């Protein structure tokens, strides 16, 4: 495959990576977060930090302490986001510390993240309230740098991870929402949520299920929460919804008429991102 040819489209590019749903959430709904990873021995057993964004739209940064940062919220270069990110990661590994990398053209044939990363440990997102992770922790932050970090932090939508379940993120915008990336086959998940919605069990605590969007082959349901709801108030409601969802996922009977209507409404409100 030539350098500028387009790899085949991959609907679910991060499938098989432990922490797939956190990677998807970091690409779409979390403004400032990191997830630690490590490359395989073949690729040097190097520390990697997946991040939401980097300054000036960089695709990667070889930080001065030797850690390579790879940004997830970048424009897809081809039909396979995993191949795109692996290409940038490998280029960053070959640069000197303190060097940034910007994606240049489409990657040709080569390894994907699934081939480059040590998959024995899951990638778990850590949410931050600023972009201090851009810097080597040993860096002495002067007044100018501190002011720049504070200014960039002002753009961050308040976001927190719900600890009791995987890949569920509270945020505060005009009001509060929960967005939860779930790792199931889309049709199976929509059927399960439709079953719950038809019997008015799709809410989360006082939150109202308002729809879902699709990104990187993963469905992300969204709830509009009661005004003023804080993230720590969602721990038990999220566990309760998780239990109801597990029960609904286990049902393999055809949807009844009410459930089909609920499903049609959910599908009609879906949006696909990337």
Image (cartoon, rainbow, N blue to C red):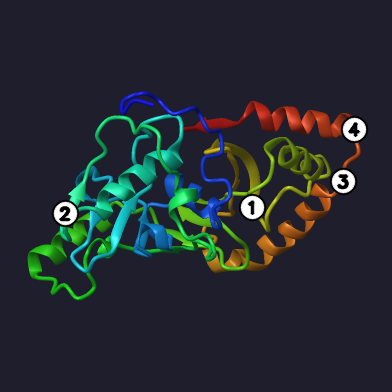
Q: Name the residue under label 1.
A: 207
Q: Which of marks 2 and 1 is nearer the N terminus?
A: 2
Query: Residue 251's mark?
Result: 3
Q: In which quarter of the image is residue 12?
A: top right
Examine the rendered structure and indicate whether residue 219 appears above or below residue 265.
below
In screen coordinates, is 253 left or right of 222? right
Residue 76, how many percent across, how many down? 38, 34
Residue 63, how many percent across, how many down? 22, 61
Callout 4: SS: loop
Q: Give the foreground label among 2 and 4.
A: 2
* Foreground of the two, 107 or 41: 41
Residue 149, how many percent across, how many down? 20, 61
Residue 36 in view here: no
Instruction: Give neighbour class at mark 4: few <14, some 14-19, many 20+ (Cα, 10 Å).
Output: few
Q: Are marks 2 and 3 in contact (CB under 8 Å)?
A: no
Q: Mark 4 points at which residue?
A: 256
Q: Give the foreground label among 3 and 1.
A: 3
């Amino acid at each position: 495959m030539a350098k500028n040819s387009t790899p085949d489209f991959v609907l679910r590019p991060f499938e098989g990576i432990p922490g797939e749903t956190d990677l998807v959430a970091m690409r779409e709904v979390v403004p400032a977060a990191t997830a630690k990873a490590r490359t395989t021995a073949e690729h040097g057993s190097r520390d990697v930090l997946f991040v939401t964004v980097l300054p000036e739209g960089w695709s990667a940064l070889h930080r001065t302490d030797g850690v390579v940062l790879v940004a997830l919220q970048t424009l897809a270069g081809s039909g396979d986001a995993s191949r795109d990110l692996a290409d940038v990661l490998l280029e960053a590994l070959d640069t000197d510390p303190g060097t940034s990398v910007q994606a240049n053209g489409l990657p040709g044939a080569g390894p994907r993240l699934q081939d480059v990363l040590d998959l024995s440990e899951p990638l778990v997102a850590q949410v931050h309230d600023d972009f201090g992770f851009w810097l080597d922790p040993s860096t002495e932050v002067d007044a100018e740098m501190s002011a720049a970090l504070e200014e960039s932090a002002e753009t961050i939508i308040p976001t927190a991870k719900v600890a009791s379940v995987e890949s569920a993120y509270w945020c505060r915008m005009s009001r509060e929402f929960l967005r939860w990336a779930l790792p199931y086959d889309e049709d199976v998940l929509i059927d399960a949520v439709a079953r719950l919605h038809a019997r008015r069990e799709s809410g989360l605590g006082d939150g109202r299920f308002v729809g879902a969007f699709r990104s990187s082959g993963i469905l992300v349901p969204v709830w509009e929460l009661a005004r003023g709801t804080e993230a720590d108030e969602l721990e038990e409601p999220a566990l309760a919804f998780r239990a109801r969802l597990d029960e609904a996922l286990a049902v393999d009977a055809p949807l009844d008429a009410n459930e089909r209507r609920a499903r049609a409404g959910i599908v009609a409100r879906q949006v696909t991102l990337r």
